[in-house]
Image (cartoon, rainbow, N blue to C red):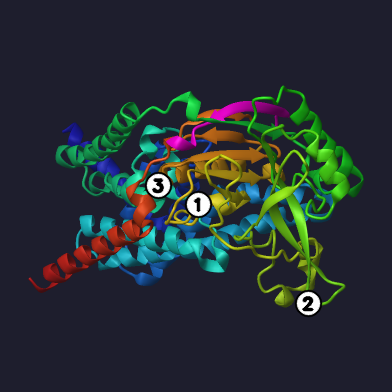
Amino acid sequence: MMTDKFIEIWQTVISKLLIHRKTLALVMGVLLAAALPPFNQLWTLYVAFSVALFLCCQTNSLKKLAAQGYFFGFGFFATGFYWIGNALLVDPLKTGWLYPIVLFLNGAFFGLFTIPPFMMSKLGKNTLMKILLFAATWCLVTEWFRGFILTGFPWNPISSVVSFSTAMLQTLAIWGAYGLSLVLIILAAWPVFWILNPSKKTAFIAALALLATDLLWEYGLYVLVNRPRVQDGNSVMVRLVQPSIPQSLKWDRQSAEDNLQQYIELSNNLDNRYIDFIVWGETASPFDLTYDKEHQRKIAQIVPKNGFLISGFLRYEVGASASEFVPYNSLAVMNKKGEILDTYDKSHLVPFGEYIPFRRFLPDWIQPVSNNVAEFGRGKQYKTIKVGKYPEFAPLICYEIIFSDQVVRKVNKPKWMIVLTNDGWYGNSAGPYQHLAAAQMRAVEEGISVVRSANSGISAVISPYGIITASIPLGVSAALDTMVKPEAAHETLFGKYGNFIPVGMSLGLILIALLFSVRKLFN
């Protein structure tokens, strides 16, 4: 009797919710953002995707499915990328008024990528097929394809929601970030069986999703417990330097010398006799170290006697005309003599940060922002650097680390990555934590260590299994000496085949779902 009453109430609730489908989709998208780092409210993943699939199952019109998908994506991306607007608050009087506009544009543009999963679900002839089509299309379009458009911005894949657990990250070594997203979405949508038809049977089916999620954790725990140990004698000693210079002073010309001096003083505060590498953050030096001999000599004083300094700096090349100079966001390796042994120029530039797409077509009212963004030169991807006796490393700058399967070369893969970044633009927000999670994910995918030095945080050393072995918290000014073990590098399935794996998984599921649906249609 109680069961019948509950079902009656539940059906009433469902009918009321269906009156406001787009609003419900928008709310679910916002709720989904709570699963992202640093909040990691994993339960919202199940609620959001179960309701999303419920809407797909209750809607036959492609137009209405597209609208629901757009509102879902609008809520998710506007909320998940809220921290991008913090860059406008560095100079609030000049650009602060654009903050709500940026929030709206984030949702308006990226919401387009969540339309295809909703529309594709229509082709499924039962609930399971709809789930498979939705999840596979999300993997292909909402995540993988988003990594290419306008040079790509694959920030916040669904797989990042489990970054709080290194055990849960271990399957990244098999199918990468997009493959794990695919699996998590299928599991998170599973409770829709119960939403559509509440009963003991469907409750058991929904519970299977939690069991499968636990299996991901159990597998990861097994990998971590049985990982090979590397002797400390095979380690590299690094000093991470994080001055936490406020972004309002970062590019202030009058503060340039003081900012560089902060790096020098923090680097000199500790005994560096046993240090192999001192690592500074992105554009730590505003001076072109390839030509500026005065600052080369000044910086060389803190370089370890038998080691090296790795620093971000601005490099300039003559452009099309003799009076034109093209800036490059670069990394330099310097020895004790002040010699620049090698450099790397950032290859994946940030849209609207390091270049403006379609700049000449922008309206006049956006010029206060666009005029402050230089057109940076683009370097070559997949460079590796070897100095002295140390293992070869892959240099990366800032958001280059967010690109799954695009951080290191496949042949003669380096044994570690060094990432320089400046997350000071985004203040004390979710952005720096999400950026750190991306570095953890790349470490597991490729099976190599990551050394991450940030101007304002979070600087960290990450093992090939995604374990943060040492870190400096966000906003803290400090230097930290710690070990890196490049010899712990190991080959992974994903590192060998890359995104062919998750893309193949998604296409395979779509094919199976379509074949099954066509067969059902003609039976």
Q: Nearer the viewer, residue 33 or 498?
A: 498
From this view, report whether residue 281 is shown above or below residue 325: above
Residue located farthest toward the left when viewing the structure as drawn? 523
Residue at 86% x, 49% y is 293
Q: Which quadrant of the structure image shows residue 221?
A: top left
Place of residue 477 in the rendered image (x, y in percent of width and height, measured from the top left): 73, 29
Instruction: Using a 10 Å C-alpha cutoff, classify the residue at mark 1 as few (fewer than 14 neighbours), some (14 to 19) or many (20 or more).
Output: many
For label 2, the residue is 320
How many labels sit on residues? 3
The Cα atoms of the two marked residues, 1 and 3, are separated by 10 Å
Find disc 3 in the rendering and name its residue.
48
Badge 2 or badge 3: first in the primary sequence: 3
Which residue lies under the disc numbered 1?
76
Q: Nearer the viewer, residue 21 or 504?
A: 504
Mark 2 or mark 3, which is nearer to you? 2
Range of magenta residues: 475-487
Q: Residue at position x 53%, y 36% from top?
A: 38
Quarter of the picture containing the N terminus is top left
Q: Earlier in the sequence, mark 1 or mark 3?
A: 3
Q: Which mark is residue 253?
A: none
Q: In the image, 157: left or right of 252?
A: left
Q: Is residue 84 left or right of residue 139?
A: right
> Along the line of sight, which residue is nearer the eye, 288 or 203?
288
Residue 421 in view (yes/no): yes
Please state which amino acid type lies under the numbered disc 2: Ala
